[in-house]
């Protein structure tokens, strides 16, 4: 990307980012996709090629507030509530939160939005779901963007062999314990994700009050690797579409060593962007850089 183009994109994204606040929730349209009787809520803004954004823990569609306006000029931008969160259904029972269900939720959203394929963008658990959708349902994915979530095989590797990542993942093992959800509350979750964003706190508190915290932790009980972290079964399918990966290097939960050798699992073009000043929520901490890079990458891979 040329220096001039970078400057222009950053300026445009800064301008767009300042507009997100009070009226964004009024400007988006609300929709519900159906996956085998489970309703998945999503919001939509703009027109054009479809982008589907998938949040992580603890979060909801509003996680992508800085990206929606910046991208809606040229794209139909859809941000979903994963099952268990906010306005999506919250089926009871851990079995409803296995990865195949989460992948099929994304496919249901793509189809409900009127498309066959989409570029999918995921963060944290949304990143895990995004990786998995590209591997398990490749006919529905034209491009893949992942924020702060290593390739699942790399995460398994790091947990098996890297004591630093094992220590960093102690919280996940806690979340896998019975009754762990009783130690959390909407207020605690709001502080985790929005402690530095006063404008967003009221939105998050309202969303988490209507969410199911036990369901949130089912993502960990059903999908997060457990000791002894040894791979099982066949290798994961390779990914042949363009992939863009962001990683905030100050992430204390998912260490950057998990990025090593990602290219070994990919057959398509791979772009890695690391941001030293950003943490786990890289799209919150560095929205201008993320938006400018994403716009440029999308333009080159349409």
Image (spheres, rainbow, N blue to C red):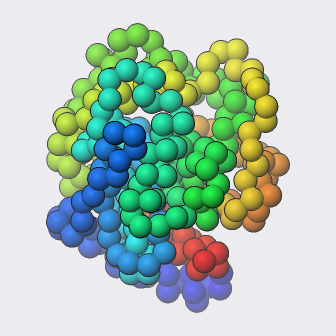
> What residue appears at the point 30 percent right and 33 percent down from the top-left corner?
90
Does 106 appear above or below 244? above
On the question of residue 263 being in view, the answer is yes
Q: Is residue 250 above or below residue 50?
A: above
Residue 245 versus residue 137: which sits nearer the camera? 137
- Residue lying farthest bottom? 4
Residue depicted at 27% across the width and 58% down the height: 31
Coordinates of residue 82 in the picture (x, y in percent)? 38, 43
Task: Give residue 226's position: percent from left, percent from top.
Answer: 61, 18
Q: Nearer the viewer, residue 155 or 91?
A: 91
> How many dots with numbers?
0
At x 33% / y 19%, what residue is drawn? 181
Q: Residue furthest front?
A: 36
Residue, x 38% and y 78% (percent of image)? 47
Which image quadrant for residue 272?
A: bottom right
Horizontal placement of 101 versus 82: left or right? right
Residue 244 coordinates in the image, percent (x, y): 63, 61
For the N terminus, which image quadrant? bottom right
Taking 241 as reference, is 129 left or right? left
Position of residue 1 relative to residue 234, above or below, is below
Residue found at the far top of this picture: 178
Tell me if 248 is positioned left or right of 183 in this view. right
Pick the quarter of the image with the C terminus: bottom right
The image position of residue 99, as x and y in percent, is 53, 35
Q: Can residue 163 be seen by looking at this rendering?
A: no
């Amino acid at each position: 990307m040329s220096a001039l183009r970078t400057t222009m994109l950053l300026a445009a994204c800064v301008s767009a980012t300042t507009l997100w606040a009070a009226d964004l929730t009024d400007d988006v349209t609300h929709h519900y996709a159906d996956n085998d009787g489970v309703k998945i809520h999503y919001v939509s803004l703009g027109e054009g090629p479809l982008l589907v954004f998938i949040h992580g823990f603890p979060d909801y569609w509003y996680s992508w507030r800085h990206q929606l306006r910046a991208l809606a000029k040229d794209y139909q931008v859809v941000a979903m509530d994963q099952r268990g969160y906010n306005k999506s259904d919250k089926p009871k029972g851990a079995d409803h939160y296995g990865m195949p269900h989460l992948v099929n939720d994304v496919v249901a959203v793509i189809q409900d939005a009127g498309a066959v394929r989409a570029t999918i963008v995921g963060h944290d658990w949304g990143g895990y779901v995004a990786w998995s959708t590209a591997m398990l349902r490749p006919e529905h994915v034209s491009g893949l963007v992942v924020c702060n979530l290593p390739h699942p095989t790399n995460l398994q590797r790091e947990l098996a062999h890297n004591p630093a990542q094992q220590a960093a993942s102690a919280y996940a093992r806690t979340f896998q314990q019975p009754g762990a959800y009783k130690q959390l509350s909407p207020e605690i979750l709001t502080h985790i994700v929005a402690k530095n964003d006063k404008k967003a706190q009221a939105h998050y508190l309202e969303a988490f009050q209507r969410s199911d915290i036990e369901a949130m932790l089912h993502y960990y009980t059903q999908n997060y690797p457990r000791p002894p972290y040894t791979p099982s079964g066949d290798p994961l399918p390779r990914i042949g579409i363009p992939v863009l990966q962001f990683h905030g290097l100050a992430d204390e939960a998912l260490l950057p060593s998990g990025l090593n050798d990602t290219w070994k699992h990919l057959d398509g073009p791979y772009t890695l962007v690391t941001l030293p000043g950003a943490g786990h929520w890289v799209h919150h901490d560095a929205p201008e850089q993320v938006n400018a890079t994403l716009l440029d990458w999308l333009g080159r891979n349409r």
